[in-house]
Image: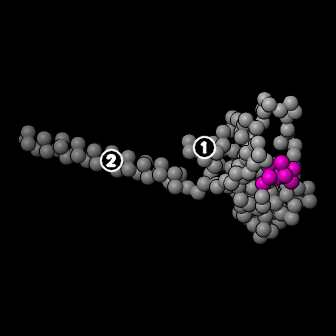
Amino acid sequence: MKTTMKFTKRFFSILFIASLMMACSKESDSLEEPLQSTYLKFAKASNNKDKVLYSDWLKSQFPTSSSNNTEFFNLPLIQNKFLDLDKDLMLVYGKRNSIFNLPVTIPASLESYAVELLPGPIGTTTRLRVSSLDLSQLQDIFFRSTAEAQFRVIIIPGEKLLSIKSKSLVNFEKMTYEEIATYFRISE
């Protein structure tokens, strides 16, 4: 009887340890997935005194239309080493024939575009949201992929925003894309 009890205790102990190991290995697999996710790549531009980061133009993933009144498109993850949400300024632009600062409202299409930042442990997700102004279904989405619409992210480091040396501060948020590109010498 004692032998059977010892065997049963050992069996359940081994079974418990094995299930714990399997549970831990599944958890570590899920942690590795975000680490292997696609990151937004940046180039650097400079006007000899100020540096800025900018992404390539990314192709839109918005559909042509939707039966919903809101659609989302996530840009690749921005690594924390490139973006400090407390200090840096991040600008997002949409391009289709012309370049638009986001957020933007397109009255002709009855659409509004917004930028949502979702911080995480390894980076920030930039989510673009298009919403119908009249809450109806989205018809003929302006920044749709079939219209060859694209998006670009520009990150201006925090120290450029509060320059102590400069007597006049530059308000980058009020500048157009063309002004930002010229100011920082961003190449297309």
User: What segment is highlighted magenta in the picture?
Assistant: 177-186
**In the rendered image, the vertical position of residue 166 relative to residue 92, given as above or below:** above
Res. 152 image quadrant: bottom right
- Which image quarter holds the N terminus? top left
Magenta-span inclusion, residue 184: yes
**What residue does disc 2 label?**
21
* Dominant secondary structure of the residues highlighted in magenta in the image: helix
Going 80% across and 57% down the picture, which residue do you hit? 94
Magenta-span inclusion, residue 91: no
Res. 58 image quadrant: bottom right
Going 60% across and 54% down the picture, which residue do you hit? 39
Crowd around label 1: few <14 · some 14–19 · many ≥20 (10 Å): few
Left or right of 155? Residue 34 is left
Which color mode does the image show? one colour
Report how many numbered discs are placed on residues in the image. Answer: 2
Going 43% across and 48% down the picture, which residue do you hit? 27
**What residue does disc 1 label?**
81
Q: Residue furthest right?
A: 108
N-terminal label among 1 and 2: 2
- Which image quarter holds the C terminus? bottom right
Left or right of 183? Residue 76 is left
For numbered disc 2, what is the local secondary structure? helix
Let me know if residue 18 appears in the view: yes
Going 68% across and 54% down the picture, which residue do you hit? 43
Q: Amino acid at mark 1?
A: Lys
Q: Position of residue 147 (x, y in %)?
A: 80, 68
Front position in the image: 147 or 11: 147
Front position in the image: 14 or 91: 91
